[in-house]
Image (cartoon, rainbow, N blue to C red):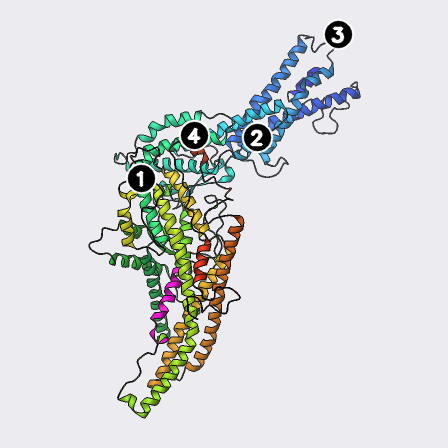
Amino acid sequence: MLHEILLCLSGQPSTLFNSQSEESLVAEDAFPLVSPPEKALLSSLAHLSRLHAKLRQHTGLISASHGSVICRAVSTAISAQHLGQFQKRILEVEKAILVEDSGYVGGYGIVPLSTIVGEFTPWTRRLEWLWQIVMHMQFADTKGAGSPCSGAALIDHLRAELQTGYADVREIALHLVSTAETAWVRQLSTWLLYGNLPILGKSDFFIHETNTIGDSQPSNGTSFEMHPKLLPQFVLPQTASSILFIGKTLNFIRIKRGTSGTNKDTGLSTTPVTLREDHIKHLAALRSPITPTMISAVVVSIRLSLSQSTLSTLLPTSKVLETLSVLHDFLLLGRGEFATALVSHADRRLYEKRQRTATSRYKSNAPAEIGGPSIKENDVVATLAQALSELYSLQNEEDLADDELELARMLLNLTINERTGDGGEVSSHFTTEAYPGLRLSNISFDDLLFPIATNLSMHINSPLDLFISASDMSVYSRIHSFLLGIRRAHFHLGDLWKHTSLRRCYPSPWGPPRSNTTYGQNRLAESRQRDNTRLRQMRAVWATSNGSLFVLSEIGSYFQGEIINESWRHFREWIMCGNHQSTYATGSRPGTASSSKSRQINTPAASHPAPGSGSIGGTSGFRRHDPETIAAAHRRYLYTLVEALFLTDVPFMEALRSLLTSIEHFIALIVRLEDIQRNMDLETDEGVIDSLVDYAGEERDLWQALDAARADVEGGIRGVVLRLRDIDDSRSAEGRQLFDIVNDKGDDWSYQSMGAETGFRHYIPRKAAGVDRLLMKLEFGNVNGSIGPGSVGVGAIGGIA
């Protein structure tokens, strides 16, 4: 019977224990002489026997077919190490019985069954725990259902299991954690040393390959993205971002070396190879259990050595600054003339298409089309090309060559944004992993330039894709459409004053000798009465226009000057390792090409860095920022811009979008009114009568629509101002300034893992003036003292009563 028990514990089938039923653990007919107390003792051994057999079976299945290399390694460790120890213990007990060890064999050669059971009792807890681990690897929920467990989830589960009160279970868990982390580090080393994804367990690695061009294209069209669900918890988000950056850099270097052949001008042929030995030493220094500080220190060391050797040539700071300057000047509308040219050429193209559509419809006698003119891809492309050409024409021969404008001409592209949905709503196109905790509103402004959604972006070629991601470009495009919508409405409101016939008597009244006749005097009296009536009617319209212009001007100046321009100046000085003091003055108005050139020339940080400023070749304690650090600072710069522009505040975005839509409708009615009044004057003064159109009736209907449009604009202004007050009250109640980000739990922007290294100055965004400054300007422009539901009208804004 003892021999049968030991065979069963080894996982061999036996008639002693019924393997088909869990209820009757001992076969009733196999050993009729076994007493009930002995059967109770044998039940624990039967449980161990079944656990051992199932563990052998399932670990063999996992080691052979599981998709995760980490799970395979842990399964093999369970089978080889811990089940092997259990088997070894069985052999030790069997040997002790055969040599009649007094610890097991009593008088008359009797071996007490309780002694055997007591010897294997500690293994019950261990095998039960191992069975839970095996079930977790197979089904991830330990209930026999669900998808297989990922390697990162297994590592997190094993590290959580270290918090146990049993020393033997903790020892086993420590060994399995070490095995799993070793397998994960081996996968990671392939990426950190060579820029290659691991061959085995590729789908289980947290970095995946995405082909942005197509399967038929060469490998330089390949990009990589990060899947946080496959990332162990001991890897912080900024550490994972650095890992992705290092691998992408090495991958780019390998591709560039392969395409350039033996070109020695790149400086990339031997540099990475000489660094691999040091990188391997860093990875080999990791000890289990790995802490966030340990893995962060290793990744930072590898990244800095790579940046100081290779990336200083591949992605210099001057190239980064040039790209960021283009983004600021054109996508963030730092150049005021670009926004003016883009809006004017877009309006001109829309006008031409409407004229051609009306002419063709008149010639073919076709019915009027529903909606606006059809906009195609070549229309938006031509609009951008014409706007950039106009900027070229504004240059003088004495001006220096505008390299930024040439770079913008090569990289900028205006495309039609294919999206579904009505009401100006659009889904977020950026990945939330790059901007944790950031939720842009669904209100879109990309259909204001054209009657179809358009998107201004910039081609990000290698190696700039190591620094600027698709998520960054998506945020830039959203900010651009938002700012351009405000600027466009501002331009159109200002153009209303160019309609001379609406502002004064036009053309001039008759003079002598015709005005001396009776007919001439009657004609002058009628004309004067008509003009006076129109001027009285237009007074409220001009008051609303002036108030709208004032509000948009102040809001646009606040966003463009106080937030965008000042934040960019602050960020640029940080990149240049300046002293964070103002080296040139910037106004609240958008800049121009000449002003931006003069700032670049006169900025000490840009031309002659001061000694000790931390610039290249400086002797101070501050090192030059590596590209990954600048990329992280750039993400925070964009994060704070989005927060400061209220792009995450849905009520404000809805109110502003409603205001801009109302203003466009209001302007269209005014322009239509001018056309109708001109035709009425031709009928009255010149006798040019169109019998098919009732201009008098249209004018009455138009005045009613114009009064309703005025009410909508005034309500939109009140809604925007009220929301600004709510934002100011909420920020004051929370004790926050404009750029204070206190709930940013998704990313450690301070890079504490790098903060221990001397010589680093991490980017802290500039704290701009709060929204109370903007509210004070709006209140100062309102002679009645308030803009809200209780105000009589908006005509008082800007000083027109």
Cβ–Cβ under 8 Å for marks 1 and 2: no
Q: Amino acid at mark 1?
A: Pro
**Tag 3 secondary structure:** helix
Indicate yes or no whether the magenta region holds residue 128. no
Q: Which kind of residue does numbered mark 2 sit on?
A: Leu
Quadrant where the C terminus lies?
bottom left
Q: Nearer the viewer, mark 1 or mark 2?
A: 1
- Cα distance between the residues tagged 2 and 4: 23 Å
- Look at 38% across and 26% down and name the residue there: 278
Q: Amino acid at mark 3?
A: Gly
Instruction: Of the two numbered discs 3 and 4 on the same chain, state the one appearing first in sequence.
Output: 3
Disc 3 to disc 4, how far (Cα)?
63 Å
Cα separation between marks 3 and 1 = 86 Å
Magenta highlight on residue 494: yes
Between marks 3 and 4 in the image, the one whose residue lies nearer the viewer = 4
Q: Report which residue position mark 3 lands on.
A: 107
Identify the mark nearer the N-term, 2 or 3.
3
Measure how far apart labels 1 and 2 are at the Cα level. Answer: 43 Å
In this picture, which residue range is highlighted in magenta?
486-502
Marks 2 and 3 sit apart, C-alpha to C-alpha, by: 46 Å
Q: Residues within 10 Å of mark 2 (few under 14, many from 20)?
A: many
Q: Classify 198 as above or below 94.
A: below
> Quarter holding the N terminus?
top right
- Residue holding disc 1: 316
Q: Local crowd at mark 1 within 10 Å, few (<14), some, or many (≥20)? A: some
